[in-house]
Image (cartoon, rainbow, N blue to C red):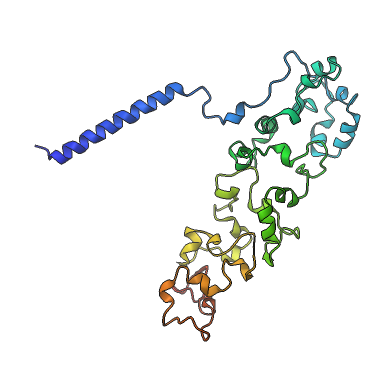
């Protein structure tokens, strides 16, 4: 005869499996077709019913100034010379224009980005720009969820920048991230303001699967190691926080008032946040003591010393 405790366990497992199967069936019935698609995938505005493509030559009859300004943009170099009645050219973004022309320039009969929501305007852009690795996560990105659309940062008509940015980096990012701008003004900082590093070198502004929209190296390591490759292991003896918590355990990534952008004013106070047991001898913290890194030079990792004396 089986143990009563074993029988109870089997009954609990059976009930649990039954409940989960029932819940799964209910969800399957409610799930609409194409349920794996992000909600904004269906946000592309519909074209005006009955409108036909007329070609970009018809657009410049009234919008000559717009066309002249746009001639220096990447969009024009790709589509601007397409003057046939196709989906390319101006109508590739604004939809077929025959109803707009027949209505004497009726603004309600053409797709206008200024009248669209962030999801709608971005969905139009993503009909072309969702296939590349750079923009593939934008529909679920922090920026779009915050109401930041493609047109918030890009100017498809006026910009001569290769990426159609409406302003230079980092000024564009600082428009929202003022607290980060303050960090870059500190004495020790990554040289973003000087133009040697860009925000997009570390962050994919269109979204990633990583926190803070951070990029990764080709080997899926922290983006810091893309530049600081001399600190890249693998090490025989690893400083654990480097792998478990990352560079930001000890460093502030944008800027600091402390050398090497560490989080505290002295190296010792930073080390003691984890190594409290070494506060007393043989490591007395008095005026005769040197910084921890005078001995433990290989703080990121070592191939020869388990206490990170040297590499």
State the image coordinates of residue 48 (x, y, percent, origin top left): 73, 17
Q: Nearer the viewer, residue 7 or 127?
A: 7
The N terminus lies in quadrant: top left
Answer left or right for 217 relative to 21.
right
State the image coordinates of residue 116 (x, y, percent, origin top left): 71, 29
Answer left or right for 101 relative to 299.
right
Answer left or right for 250 relative to 167.
left
Q: Is residue 236 visible?
A: no
State the image coordinates of residue 208 (x, y, percent, origin top left): 58, 44
Task: State which quadrant residue 251 falls in.
Answer: bottom right
Q: Is residue 46 above or below residue 37?
A: above
Q: What is the count of numbered marks?
A: 0
Q: Residue furthest top?
A: 50
Q: Is residue 206 above or below residue 249?
A: above
Q: Nearer the viewer, residue 134 or 140?
A: 140
Task: State which quadrant residue 112 falls in.
Answer: top right
State the image coordinates of residue 30 (x, y, percent, origin top left): 45, 22
Q: Residue at x 59, y 55 (%)?
A: 223
Q: Residue furthest left?
A: 1
Q: Residue at x 56, y 74 (%)?
A: 266
Answer left or right for 168 relative to 35.
right
Q: Nearer the viewer, residue 307 or 287?
A: 287
Q: Residue at x 50, y 76 (%)?
A: 296
Q: Residue at x 74, y 48 (%)?
A: 172
Q: Is residue 36 visible?
A: yes
């Amino acid at each position: 005869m089986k143990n009563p405790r074993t029988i109870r366990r089997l009954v609990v497992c059976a009930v649990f499996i039954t409940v989960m199967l029932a819940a799964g069936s209910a969800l399957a019935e409610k799930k609409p077709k194409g349920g794996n698609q992000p909600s904004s995938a269906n946000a592309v505005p519909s074209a005006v019913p009955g409108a036909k493509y007329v070609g970009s030559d018809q657009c410049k009859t009234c919008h000559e100034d717009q066309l002249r300004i746009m001639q220096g943009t990447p969009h024009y170099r790709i589509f601007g010379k397409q003057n046939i009645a196709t989906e390319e050219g101006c109508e590739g973004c604004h939809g077929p224009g025959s109803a707009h022309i027949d209505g004497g320039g009726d603004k309600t009969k053409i797709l206008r980005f200024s009248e669209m929501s962030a999801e709608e305007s971005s969905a139009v852009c993503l009909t072309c720009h969702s296939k590349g690795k750079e923009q593939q996560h934008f529909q679920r990105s922090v920026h779009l969820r915050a109401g930041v659309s493609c047109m918030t940062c890009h100017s498809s008509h006026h910009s001569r920048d290769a990426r159609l940015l409406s302003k230079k980096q980092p000024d564009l990012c600082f428009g929202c991230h003022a607290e980060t701008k303050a960090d870059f003004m500190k004495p020790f900082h990554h040289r973003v303001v000087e133009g040697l590093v860009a925000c997009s070198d570390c962050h994919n502004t269109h979204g990633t699967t990583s926190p803070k929209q951070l990029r990764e190296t080709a080997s899926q390591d922290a983006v810091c190691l893309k530049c600081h490759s001399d600190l890249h292991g693998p090490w025989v003896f690893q400083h654990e926080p480097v792998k478990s918590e990352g560079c930001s355990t000890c460093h502030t990534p944008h800027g600091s008032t402390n050398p090497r952008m560490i989080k505290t004013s002295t190296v010792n106070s930073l080390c003691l946040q984890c190594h409290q047991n070494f506060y007393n001898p043989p490591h007395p913290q008095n005026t005769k003591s040197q910084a921890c890194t005078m001995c433990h030079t290989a703080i990121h990792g070592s191939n020869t010393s388990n206490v990170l004396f040297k590499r």
